[in-house]
Image: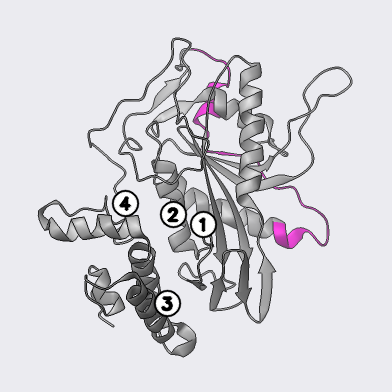
Amino acid sequence: MSSDSGDLYSVLGIGPDADAQAVRAAYRKQARRAHPDAGGTAEAFHQVQSAWEVLGDEAARASYDRRLRQPQRADTEDDPESARPTYGRGASAAAFRTTASGSTSARSSSTDSARSPSGTAHLAPVYVPDLSQPEPLSLPLTSQRSHGHFASRGLFGGGRTRRAERMASLLEKHVLAELPTARLFNAVAIEPAGKDRRGASRPPRGPAVDHVLVCGDTLVVVTSLEVPAAAASWDGGRLHAAGRSLSLPDLAGESRLLRATLEAGMRETGRETSLNLGQQLVLLSPDGGMQSPVVESRGGAGRAPLAPARAFRSIREQLASSEQANVIDRHLLAALRRQLQNPMN
């Protein structure tokens, strides 16, 4: 296998004229060779996986082929896996739009976000409403990057809490530090917050997602799972590792329910909005390695679970896809604050 990760065809050991069947066969061959269990390395295996993710997708391969034919225009835009994405610091981009009431516009489709970085994530932040107004969220909370914490669930719930706290710290370091306008919310209830007997809002109960990242009009729901193995495989529905087969949480379903709750809550305050969605399951190794476990994808719909390094890149790309990635919607932040199960921070 070629070590030149810049040429995805060389990584799989084939030529640009290979048909889809040949690409799949080459991927399987190289994945077996590069797998750590067969004497390969995590880096080599990730190169093979990255090549397959582009060449195994008809649209992504066509975009990559256009890039090969036009080397003078080569950049990270057409091949998101070949290099870390450029989020547009100093780049020109389409301006965000606001309605007369100050609400930000969003995509008209209800499908999940799966777009390329828009180029606006590193433009100057725009606050809606502007900071001259103390409502709907106080200025200190508007500027706060991370919200909510995890309450201990007793003797047998400590492990999950520690894992979630560890993931929150990693998200702050590898996502928030890269995207100036992104915000992180921890332990976010899916169902609407209730009221007490006096009509005052109380912290919501019921099912919750571990982490929600917001940037512009895009939400990415994140959770983590510790895998005590160097390698795993994913078939689109279950994760296979260390001789076990695990069902994964339905992040897509949970994120859609949360979106419905947030949009309904904002409508009650006179805000019409439509949010983009993304999800990511992050696999953690006991030794804290950023590249492990390596995950072999065996097809199937949905976003594959990933080791931290690749997962954080995926999360950044999803968040940066928003054309309004530099907009901080204070109404949306306030709506997310209302969903925090433990808002004391």
For residue 198, say whether it is visible: yes
For badge 2, the amino acid type reads Ser
Nearer the observer: mark 1 or 4; the answer is: 1
Residue at 58% across, 56% down: 167
Task: Find disc 1 in the rendering and name its residue.
Answer: 303
SS state under label 4? loop
Q: CA distance from mark 2 to mark 3?
A: 18 Å
Q: Which image quadrant is residue 336 in?
A: top right
Mark 1 or mark 3: name the one nearer the start of the chain.
3
Q: CA distance from mark 1 to mark 4?
A: 18 Å
Q: CA distance from mark 1 to mark 3?
A: 20 Å
Q: Which image quadrant is residue 258 in?
A: top right
Mark 4 or mark 3: name the one nearer the start of the chain.
3
Characterize the local packing of mark 2: few (<14), some (14-19) or many (20 or more) Cα atoms within 10 angstroms: many
Task: Find disc 3 in the rendering and name its residue.
Answer: 42
Segment colored magenta = 133-160
The circle on residue 85 is: 4
Task: Find disc 2 in the rendering and name its residue.
Answer: 314
Q: CA distance from mark 4 to mark 3?
A: 21 Å
Q: CA distance from mark 1 to mark 2?
A: 10 Å
Tag 1 near tag 2, CB within 8 Å: yes
